[in-house]
Amino acid sequence: MARLLYSLVIYLATPLILLRLLWRSRQQAEYLRNLAERWAFYRAPSPEKLIWVHAVSVGETRAAQPLIEAMQRAWPDHRILLTCMTPTGREAGREVYGDRVIQAYLPYDYPDAVDRFFRHFSPSLGVLMETEIWPNLLAAAKERGFPVILANARLSERSARGYGKLAALARPAFSALSAVAAQTPGDGERIAALGAGKVSVCGNLKFDVTPPPEKIALGHAWREALGDRQIWLAASTREGEEALLLDAWQGVAATRALLVLVPRHPQRFTEVATLLAQRGMEFMQRSRGLPDKTTKVWLGDSMGEMAAYFTLADIAFIGGSLLPLGGQNLIEAASCGCPVLVGPHTFNFLQATNDAIAAGAAHRVADAGGVIKAIIESLADRPRLQEMRIAARRFAANHRGASERTLAVICSAAIEPPPDRAAR
């Protein structure tokens, strides 16, 4: 009954879904491209042997890279179908994988659309990245005897409480999962409490993602071009955070330090540029070239260059953590050897954040004023920054190995095990 009511709500919400796509297309025209795929009408034929991986957007797409590469080695006769929900996720898929994977949108969770998706692609198994729980999708998979694994799974206490309030809908969905590869013991416990079986703790796949060498080289080239100027990075900032940081930064006495400001979502690049202009701050956009000596803020209006920004910066603040948004992931910064500051709200990545702080790779501050105070103190203490850089690289290296552990979980749940494992 709960899933029937849920499906009815989705059908009734169809006009609102279309309006939302139209609204978002005002800033990103790509939202109206491949529109039919969102209702599982696909033009391209499907290969006979297919493994399906769903990564909702950019972060999950990049995190899936070591696992996808491991599955390609394990099942060399299968193609990978990579689905997402956003145009930026699809673009990240093209950048990371090129033509090595097939890309499509996962349809919205209508029962008939889910049925068309499975009939068109007929994958051998499915892997959902992080916390993509769709009741009709998982029910359809279970009815078909089709294994679905939740990989790199994370679930905050807040999200677990939300699912708990919808237990009649959530518990059957979680119990339909064939296996779960959780990031941390806490994630595993919360997911198991919601009805999932066969939960293993495998670590975070993002530790296994190697920063692209060409992006590291780009960051070093920027650094050389900018000379000895001190640089701090506000990475993956969310709506409302830029104003708080700029208020605190503008209140500081004259400094030569350059702020590199990179909003989380590309549709906000123009909005943040307008904010900087309204404040009369000298800024340059990445899309228009390198900053000069008078530039106060360099606006990172580019995609796929975060590793270059982390390589460039002396220290970085990780956005989403000043306001109660849960924070963004600091693992890529650590992999690039960049010291990190985080705000008070990191519940989305609590274990990784706490581990980084304990390792000396990160430091927590209370508010925007605390960010700026810590930035100024850190830039004045070069030996401490160097210690944090070493700690960041050590922290990232010590947590690698999740992709092989996750692959083992997937192989144990697969109907058709990889050829090399089946022979054992």
Image: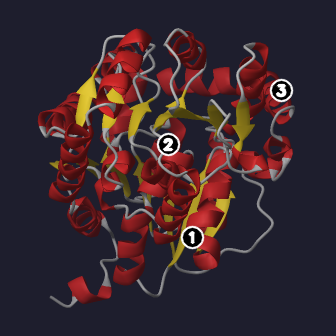
Sooner in the amino-acid sequence: mark 2 or mark 1: 1
Vertically, is 168 above or below 118? above
Return the residue at label 2: 229
Foreground: disc 2 or disc 1:
2
Q: Is residue 24 left or right of residue 317?
A: right
Q: What residue type is labelled 1?
A: Tyr
Q: In which quarter of the image is residue 17?
A: top right
How far apart are the two marked residues, 2 and 3, measured between alpha carbons? 41 Å
Task: Please state the horizontal and vertical placement of residue 107, each as a whole percent of the image.
Answer: 66, 46
Q: Residue 58 carries which label?
A: none
Q: Residue 97 carries which label?
A: 1
Q: Is residue 285 left or right of residue 98?
A: right
Q: Is residue 117 left or right of residue 377?
A: right
> Which element type, helix, strand or loop, lies under badge 2?
loop
Identify the residue at horizontal 23%, vertical 85% (top origin): 422
Residue 167 seen in the figure:
no
> Which element type, helix, strand or loop, lies under badge 3?
helix
Return the residue at label 3: 23
Identify the residue at horizontal 68%, vertical 49% (top origin): 290
Q: How many residues crowd mark 2 within 10 Å: few (<14), some (14–19), many (20+)? A: few
Task: Please state the horizontal and vertical placement of residue 416, each as a whole percent of the image.
Answer: 34, 76
Foreground: disc 2 or disc 3:
2
Q: Is residue 367 left or right of residue 6?
A: left
